[in-house]
Image (cartoon, rainbow, N blue to C red):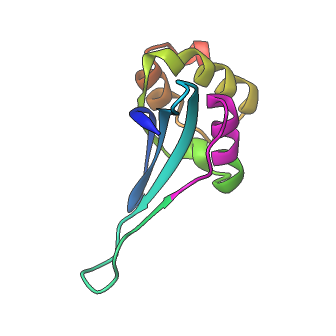
Amino acid sequence: MTNKTKVLEIGAEGGSITMYRVFDAKDHDWYIYSVNDMGLDDEVPGVIKDSNYSMSYVEAFFRMLKAYPHLLELYPLYVHADFAYSTMVIIKELTINKDYINYTEWAKVLEVTEVDLK
């Protein structure tokens, strides 16, 4: 797999979850997310875990949600412009009438208004 491009990054206390788009030898794109948990001190090392490959951004996003059900409650740091609309649609569909996500921060990173997300 080549051409690793960050498409999504979400911060959490003590680490982050980052999704990447990669290309195989036939130039097909695949998606993988990586979890980086920092260690509490020098005696406890951090952990980096990679997911299985997904065939689409949406599939990878839902795999992340299955593994981390509170994903949308975390702090969004980055969404690649090519994936902003898909991310916005996912958030809108999953958070109808929900107050638990930080609409302000998601709106900033997606470069939309909070109204667009609700």
Residue reaching furthest bottom?
Answer: 43
Decide whether residue 94 is among the magenta residues: no
Q: Residue at x 61, y 44 (%)?
A: 53
Q: Is residue 73 left or right of residue 22?
A: right
**30 shown above or below 34:** above
Q: Is residue 107 left or right of residue 61?
A: left
Q: Residue at x 38, y 62 (%)?
A: 14
Q: Where does the image place residue 24, in percent across and percent down from the top left?
A: 52, 33
Q: Where does the image place residue 110, in percent across and percent down from the top left?
A: 47, 20
Residue in the foreground of this view, choosing between 23 and 108: 23
Per the rendered image, the range of residues in magenta is 50-64
Q: Residue at x 49, y 28 (%)?
A: 106
The image quadrant where one finds the C terminus is top right
Q: Residue at x 69, y 46 (%)?
A: 63
Residue in the foreground of this view, choosing between 104 and 64: 64
Q: Is residue 118 left or right of residue 19?
A: right
The image quadrant that residue 43 belongs to is bottom left
